[in-house]
Amino acid sequence: MAVHYEHDAYAWALEQAGLLRAGKLEQLDLEHLAEVIESMGKSERRALVSQLARLLMHLLKWDHQPERRSRSWRLTIIDAQAKTNRLLNDNPSLKASLPELMSEAYEDARRAAAIETDSELHAFPEKCMYSFDEAVTFQPVEH
C-alpha cells in the first residue's frame, strides 16, 4: 500500500528508499522525491549560513566589547567553528559558494550583534572584516 507524501512524510521517505533499493523505479513518486532532494540541499545551505552567522556575530561581539569577553562567548565561537567545518566537510560543494554565504551570514550577524550589544547597526562595518579562513581559525583568548 502506497504511503502519501502529504499524510506521513517520514513513512513516505522510508517507502521511497525501499523502492529505490529494490529497483522498483516505476513505483517511485518522482515529483515529490525531486522536491525532497532539492529541499535537503537547501537545508544544508541554510544550516551553514546559520552557523556562519552565529560565528560572525560572536566575533563581532568579541571585537566590539572586549570588556565583556567570557568563557561562554569563547565556547560559542569554538562550537560554531567546529559545526561550520563539519557542515563543509559533509557538503564540500558548498565551498564554492563561501563568498556569497559569508556575505549573507554577515548581514544576519551584524544585525544580531547590534541587538545583543545594544549598539546601533552602523557601529559594525558594512562589509565583513573576516575572511572565511580567519573566522574558522580565530582563537579566542580571554584577557
Image: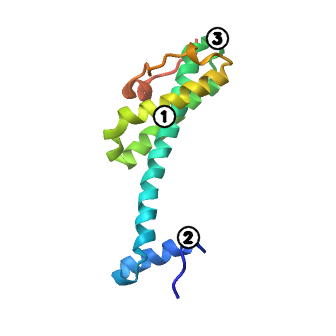
Q: Residue 97 location, x and y as percent?
A: 35, 39
Q: Residue at x 62, y 21 (%)?
A: 114
Q: Earlier in the sequence, mark 2 or mark 1?
A: 2
Q: Residue 20 location, x and y as percent?
A: 37, 77
| Mark 3: few/some/many CA within 10 Å (<14, 14-19, 20+) | few
Residue annotated with mark 2 = 10
Residue annotated with mark 3 = 67
Whole-number angstrom distance, CA of label 2 to CA of label 1: 29 Å
| Applied colour scheme | rainbow
Q: Is residue 20 above or below residue 118?
A: below
Which residue type does callout 3 highlight? Glu
Q: Nearer the viewer, residue 21 or 104?
A: 104
| Mark 1: few/some/many CA within 10 Å (<14, 14-19, 20+) | many
Q: Nearer the viewer, mark 3 or mark 2?
A: 2
Q: Is residue 72 above or below residue 143?
A: below
The C terminus: image quadrant: top right
Q: Residue 22 location, x and y as percent?
A: 36, 82
Determine the secondary structure under disc 3: helix
Determine the secondary structure under disc 2: helix
| Mark 2: few/some/many CA within 10 Å (<14, 14-19, 20+) | few
Q: Which image quadrant is residue 98 in? A: top left
Which residue type does callout 1 highlight? Leu
Q: Earlier in the sequence, mark 3 or mark 2?
A: 2
Q: Residue at x 43, y 76 (%)?
A: 29
Residue annotated with mark 1 = 52
Q: Residue 139 location, x and y as percent?
A: 47, 22
Q: Residue at x 51, y 38 (%)?
A: 51
Whole-number angstrom distance, CA of label 1 to CA of label 3: 24 Å
Whole-number angstrom distance, CA of label 3 to CA of label 2: 48 Å
